[in-house]
Image (tube, coloured by chain):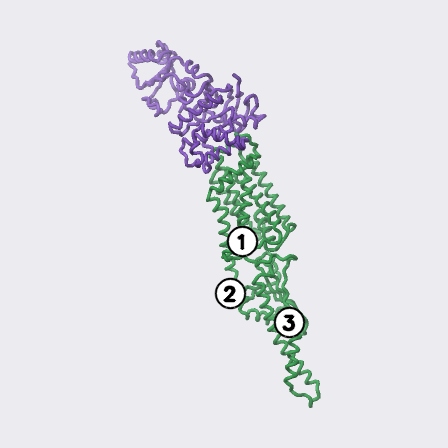
Amino acid sequence: MPHILEVENMVKKYGEFEAVKGVSFDVEEGEVFGLLGPNGAGKTTTISMITGLFPPTSGTARIDGHDILKEPLLVKQMNGLVPQDLALYPTLSARANLQFFGRVYGLSGKKLKENVEDVLRVVSLTERADQTIEKYSGGMKRRVNIAAGLVHQPRLLFLDEPTVGVDPQSRNHIFESVQRLNRERGMTIIYTSHYMEEVELLCNRVAIIDQGKLIALDTIKNLVAMLGGGVLRIGVRHADDHLLAALSQLPSVKNASLLQSVAQPNPEVQTPDLLHTLPAVIKIETQNSQQALIHVINYLEDQNIALLSLDILENNLESVFLHLTGKQLRE
Amino acid sequence: MKILSIAWKDLKIFFKEPGYLIYLIVLPLVFILLFTTLFSASIGSTSDTNKISLVVVNLDSGGEQAEQLLKGLEATGTIQVIPSTLEKTQSDFRDTRITQYLTIPENFSQNIAVGKKVEVTLTALDTFSMSVQTLRMSTYGVVNDMLLERSILQSLEQFAAMQSALPSENRLYDPEMLTAQAKSQFISSKERPLVDVKVEVPQTSKTSEEDFSMVQFSVPGFTVLFAFLVSQATARSIYDEKKNGSFRRLMAAPLSKLQLLGGKLLPNFLVVIFQILVIFFTSTVLLSWLGMDRLSLGQSPLTLAAISIMLALCSTSLGILIAAIAKTEAQIGGVSALFLWLMGFLGGTMVPLDVMSSPMLNTISKFIPHSYAVGAYKDVLTLGAGFNTVLPALGVLLGFSVLFFAIGLWRFDFD
């Protein structure tokens, strides 16, 4: 598949602070590409540079072979941006908003009218299109926000955290819209999120960004396979090199390491996670988490070490991120 | 086309917001009505509100006939005489603090005494105003009354001279001769009045066929003040776009920075023009329906249009400057208060610059665009000036526009 987007060593500096540190990746035409990372990782800055909101300090990107710095207007015409904020005019109706953004992209007359009706259908808002946005629910506003990025039928759509603050029903609706746009219209979509579930659901390939660096890029299947059999996270009163070495030698265990950075428990996951109160937390990467668990518990019992907490992380992007950074996505 | 799309969208948002309409369209009209009513009332309030104030420059100070004329004017009961010097009066008149004054020439009394024709001059901005007509007729009346006494005395003096020239036996008191002589004297003074009242308008062209009123003073000031206040709305609109993220969305669209800024600034220009049209329409047409004086547009509507366009341009440029300087909502409020209200006051939009007799304030006003716009409007509206007269002011306004735009563009944060 041809690359519709090629990002080359993009850097963005604000004074001494380097927000994006040499990010490079390619996106194939027709794929849904995920940019996954915690808040402040540099995802929005990266897509802001690609979409021409501001120039990179160094590096560049090409969209369909056109350099974003040399042919900015041409490139912008091919892009659609759905920003994280509700970038709409609340006192205007959904239809008036969409007509305006269509005109800004050069649409007029019959074509404008057709495209507006089309995107209203895509986001299921035809019935209420003439109501002012300020009367919409948060989810409906999000849908209009997406429609505004679609109205000119871009080849490449950037969705920047499109589900932030959205109720579950609207979230599902957004997922369906993204899948339909990709499946039925072949639209290439760059989807940024710090929700790994969304990226797992929607994306073919994922780039993981942390602290301005791209730390992994592959299909979800390959990224998860990289970890092997899952991760155990145990809390103990004291951990030293001897204990870590002993755990690493156990059958089905690949490696044991001390987690230096301990997170607040995630209330949504509802794990008995009291890590932040524990003196020591050990991450145990396994080849088979069930078998490894039995060996770990037996060893701790033999050594008379109290197991204060236990967290079994089935392999997913969250554990990939944990593996790569030593912290959780939502920290 | 894209500029027009952005501008049209902003205008739709503007006209959907009642607050902006009240602030920028209704409020100036309210100010004009209040100011006109209050200021008009205050003009005659020095002693008797029913009297017309008349500044008199008496260049025949101490002259018996001049004093008699002044007393006669006061005695009419309709005029309040305010004595003043020629220099101050001319300055006040030039700066439109007074709208008419009477000048009694040097040797007024002496010339009357020797039967030489003299002329008092009533100088007015508008010869057709009711107050000027009243003053002219009253002055004529006083002068005629004054001369009646003089004529009777002259008749009797002539009669006595004729009697004394005759032989003593022929010096007879003849009432018929006395009456005939007096009548002849009256007719002569009527046909060849010794004192004439000349009404003078300082310009070559008349200002207006309409009555002059305080609307002529208040409309220019408040028009300029509120035209510049539109720039606050522009800065606010840009701030709102940045805050809600739609500015980012526009930056991601295939628009040049010039198109984007042009689209954001064009509504400012159009709103100011609309605002001026509403204010002038209301002041020229609707005010008379309310029983108030109406605005006279002077003799050169095209010059008024040129001033309005330049004013709108300057206000628009100031809008981008404020948007560039102020980064938060509070800063927009603060900068606007500083730039718009303070500059408006110092620029003479609320209180005429001449009333602020401080040399320092008058010097400061020279660095404020408001003062040039107000001055140009006043020149056209009250003095009947044409394009050439206001050309320097238009040039200065253009200069301010370029300066504001250049600084605004330089400091504007597109990120």
Measured in 3D between alpha carbons, the distance from the residue under mark 1 to the one under mark 3, in whole angstroms, is 48 Å
Q: Earlier in the sequence, mark 3 or mark 2?
A: 2
Q: Residue at x 34, y 12 (%)?
A: A292
Among the chains, which one is purple? A
Which mark identifies residue B109? Answer: 3
Callout 1: few (<14), some (14-19), or many (20+) C-alpha neighbours within 10 Å? few
- Of B22 and A192, the residue lying toward us: B22
Task: State the hue of chain B.
Answer: green
Callout 2: few (<14), some (14-19), or many (20+) C-alpha neighbours within 10 Å? few
Which mark identifies residue B285? Answer: 1
User: Which secondary structure, mark 1?
Assistant: helix
Q: Report the side of B311 relative to A299 (left or right).
A: right
Q: Amino acid at mark 1?
A: Val
B310 shown above or below B47: above
Measured in 3D between alpha carbons, the distance from the residue under mark 1 to the one under mark 2, in whole angstroms, is 27 Å
Which mark identifies residue B50? Answer: 2
Q: Where does the image place residue A21, in percent across and percent down from the top left?
A: 50, 22
* Mark 1–mark 3 CB contact (< 8 Å): no
User: Which secondary structure, mark 2?
Assistant: loop
Q: Where does the image place residue B223, in percent across and percent down from the top left?
A: 54, 49
User: For the view shown, which residue lies furthest in the bottom direction?
Assistant: B169
Measured in 3D between alpha carbons, the distance from the residue under mark 3 to the one under mark 2, in whole angstroms, is 30 Å
Q: Residue at x 65, y 86 (%)?
A: B174
